[in-house]
Amino acid sequence: MHKDFIYLDNAATSWPKPDAVGDAMSDFLRTKAGNPGRGGHYLARQASEVVEAAREKLSKLINAPDTKRVVLTQGCTDSLNLAIHGVVRAAMKCCCPESKIHVVTTAIEHNAVLRTLFCFAGDGLLDLDIVPCDEHGIMEPHAIADACNDRTVLVAVSHASNVLGTIQPIKEIAEAIRACCPDVLFMVDAAQTAGHFEIDVQRDDIDLITIAGHKGLRGPTGTGALYVGPRAFPDSCTNTRLFCERRGGTGSTAPGLEMPKDLPDALEAGTANAVGFAGLIAAMDTLNEATHEHEMTLTKQILDGLVKIQGVRVYGKPTIEGRMPVVLFNIEGYCARDAGALFDKDHHIAVRGGLHCAPELHNAIGTYLDGGVRVSPGSATTAQQIERFIDAVRIIASS
Ligand code: PMP
């Protein structure tokens, strides 16, 4: 790695991870690495304790009403697939063949949501409405509610755009949906926000929430979670609205060929990434409010610096209000991918240039097919590094 390397791609994955993450993972592998939930021996118990501690920590993070409602996954894409396939399959089983189920989502969604829904819509198995956003990538709560009808089973909304960093009014969206369709399942993709913002599934009336462990929570890749609320999966474990197609061992006593009926085992099959969750626990122990404030101060420095450079266009909200530490821009005369490559090659700065897995949003802001350069500072980024980044933009823009 170059001695002056600067990492500004924390929206893709946070880096560097806190030292405690590697230490905890190494300690786990040396002293706790049995198979969690499998067997009652010492090492298996140690591994189980780690996995359950991670569940507990994630449960507190989102104020889940019950820890068992947090299903551990391999990441946010995994959580989204589990939720979307689960809800759609369960709804299709109940609905009469002549009335297709309906799902509402938004133009700001990541491909982890869009492609998963398209796989059903493309096969004619559901009707999909994609509600447009404004030019800053903000959703209007009533526009989402208005798109719902009596066949709607799921509304899927990202908490924050991974392209523009704009934060959505989740509580207002939930209220607008509930006013017209009290039973619809409301899913929030918190890939970009978990670890940055307080998330409260009870206060905001969220039924399903998907979390990545490797972004704002600063844990290792291969970790994530899906919260499953009582509307989707009642305590009685009957009339569940999430049908899991995954099958396999769960470690819990489950005679017979059916999966256990209770959460989380009903949705968790196979050996958990216990070493990853050991790292995630350590990462979450390092989280504090000062980190987000620091990242937002740097984001302001980026916005203030970029607007002064001729030939640079910044997308999304002009200020840091209602924003994540994510900024998208373009430099006149450069395709975003080439600009990204120049930052890497000539300036040793890691940014992401091109499309960012959210084609509908790029369409809405006029950056489809070229995309934009996304810059996202993290907890270890310094003001001096941002100055160097702004200098690099100036050099590229003037050459
Ligand atoms: N949703 C959003 C909004 C994202 O930004 C991402 C990651 N870029 C994902 C989902 C997928 O997350 P993961 O990488 O953990 O699968």
Image: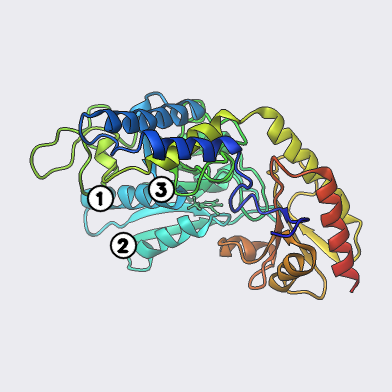
Examine the image and state in which quarter residue 234 appears. top left
Which of the two marks, 2 or 3, is nearer to us in this view? Answer: 3
Callout 3 crowding tier (Cα within 10 Å): few <14, some 14–19, many ≥20: many
Residue 59: which disc? Answer: none
> In the rendered image, is residue 300 in sight?
yes
Q: Secondary structure at mark 1?
A: loop
Give x and y (percent) for residue 59.
44, 28
Which residue is tagged 1?
Answer: 246
Which residue is tagged 2?
Answer: 125
> In the rendered image, is residue 306 in sight?
no
Task: Looking at this view, name the residue that lies furthest to the front.
Answer: 30
Callout 2 crowding tier (Cα within 10 Å): few <14, some 14–19, many ≥20: some
Examine the image and state in which quarter residue 269 appears. top left
> Residue placed at 22% from the left, 27% from the top?
236
Which of the two marks, 2 or 1, is nearer to us in this view? Answer: 1
Which residue is tagged 3?
Answer: 74
Rounded to the nearest angstrom, the CA distance separating label 2 from label 3 is 27 Å
Q: Quadrant of the C terminus?
A: bottom right
Give x and y (percent) for residue 359.
57, 65
The answer to whether the beta carbon of the residue marked 3 is less than 8 Å from any atom of ligand 1 is: yes
